[in-house]
């Protein structure tokens, strides 16, 4: 009798244990399935983001361009601090190399931006893509496409509207010689806070400072002097645009 009772109890324990294990496994399987579904949905959402790859390339290119610009500024400072002929030669070599790297970085940034714009246009047929609406084309962009540092065109897009003073541009002589007309038009805007030249952001981005100084009433500089600092397309001999073409393109 005792053996039969113990055998029955043992059978009940085995059945209960098997039932518990089965329930736990089912719950774990369901949880794993739900987690997998959530991860899959998240990945699909990321993959479905419009132009995500192009946006990432633009962000990366901006960082590289910013880093390259810092190297140029650092090289310019090093050249100013150089005393001996050997030091000046070394500093000049480093500056030239830094400028080439900056130019390539800005070209990559411009290419990435064009790819992003193209993707957005594809995503929204017949329209400019996501955003508040169409934007005004940058009139200086043709010069940057021809070799002017892209940072200057990016800065141009942030300038105030030209023509605020209603007078002739103080640097019109440079545009008559081939400087993009958009720069001369922007120079007619009111001075920035503190009396700075209305186009000073362009010089902060790499345009020769002599041009911005002239825009503040300092007198138009000799184009040959400007070209020794930056080979501006259209203005400087050997640039990628023919003489005066940048002004007509603008």
Image (cartoon, rainbow, N blue to C red):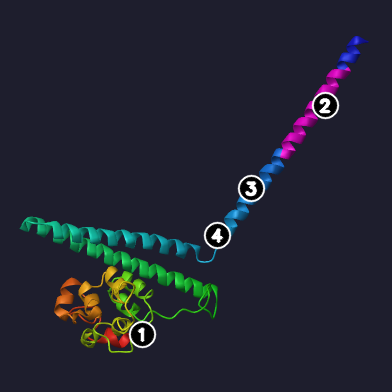
Pointer 4 and pointer 2: residues touching (CB < 8 Å)? no
Q: CA distance from mark 3 to mark 2?
A: 32 Å
Picture quarter containing residue 61? bottom left
- Using a 10 Å C-alpha cutoff, classify the residue at mark 4 as few (fewer than 14 neighbours), some (14 to 19) or many (20 or more): few
Q: Which residues are magenta?
A: 8-27
Residue 9 appears in the rendering: yes
The residue to which callout 3 is attached is 36
Indicate yes or no whether the magenta region holds residue 105: no
Q: Earlier in the sequence, mark 3 or mark 4?
A: 3
The residue to which callout 2 is attached is 15
The image position of residue 110, as x and y in percent, is 36, 70
Q: Earlier in the sequence, mark 4 or mark 2?
A: 2
The residue to which callout 1 is attached is 164
User: In what quadrant of the picture does the N terminus appear?
Assistant: top right
Q: Is residue 237 left or right of residue 145?
A: left
Between 155 and 65, the one nearer to me in the picture: 155
The residue to which callout 4 is attached is 47
* Circle 1: element type: loop
Q: CA distance from mark 3 to mark 1?
A: 61 Å
Q: CA distance from mark 4 to mark 2?
A: 48 Å
User: In what quadrant of the picture does the C terminus appear?
Assistant: bottom left
| Residue shown at 30% from the left, 88% from the top | 248
Q: CA distance from mark 1 to mark 2?
A: 90 Å
Q: Is residue 32 left or right of residue 247?
A: right
* Circle 3: element type: helix
Q: Is residue 61 above or below residue 228?
A: above
Between 203 and 37, the one nearer to me in the picture: 203
Q: CA distance from mark 4 to mark 1?
A: 47 Å
Q: Earlier in the sequence, mark 4 or mark 1?
A: 4
Q: Earlier in the sequence, mark 3 or mark 1?
A: 3
């Amino acid at each position: 009798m005792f053996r039969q009772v113990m055998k029955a109890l043992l059978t009940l324990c085995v059945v209960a244990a098997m039932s518990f294990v089965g329930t736990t496994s089912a719950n774990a399987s369901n949880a794993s399935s739900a987690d997998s579904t959530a991860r899959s949905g998240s990945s699909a959402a990321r993959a479905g983001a419009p132009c995500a790859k192009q946006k990432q390339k633009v962000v990366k290119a901006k960082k590289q361009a910013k880093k390259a610009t810092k190297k140029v500024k650092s090289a310019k400072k090093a050249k100013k601090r150089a005393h001996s002929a050997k030091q000046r030669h070394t500093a000049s070599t480093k500056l030239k190399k830094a400028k080439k790297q900056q130019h390539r970085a800005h070209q990559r940034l411009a290419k990435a931006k064009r790819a992003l714009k193209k993707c957005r246009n594809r995503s929204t047929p017949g329209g400019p893509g996501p955003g508040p609406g169409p934007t005004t084309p940058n009139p200086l962009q043709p010069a940057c496409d021809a070799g002017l540092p892209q940072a200057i065109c990016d800065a141009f897009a942030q300038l105030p509207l030209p023509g605020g003073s209603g007078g002739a541009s103080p640097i019109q002589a440079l545009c008559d010689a081939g400087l993009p007309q958009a720069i001369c038009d922007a120079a007619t805007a009111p001075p920035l806070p503190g009396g700075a030249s209305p186009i000073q952001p362009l010089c902060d981005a790499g345009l020769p400072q002599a041009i911005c100084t002239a825009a503040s009433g300092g007198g138009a500089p000799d184009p040959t002097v400007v070209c020794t600092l930056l080979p501006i397309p259209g203005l400087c001999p050997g640039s990628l645009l023919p003489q005066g073409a940048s002004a007509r393109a603008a």
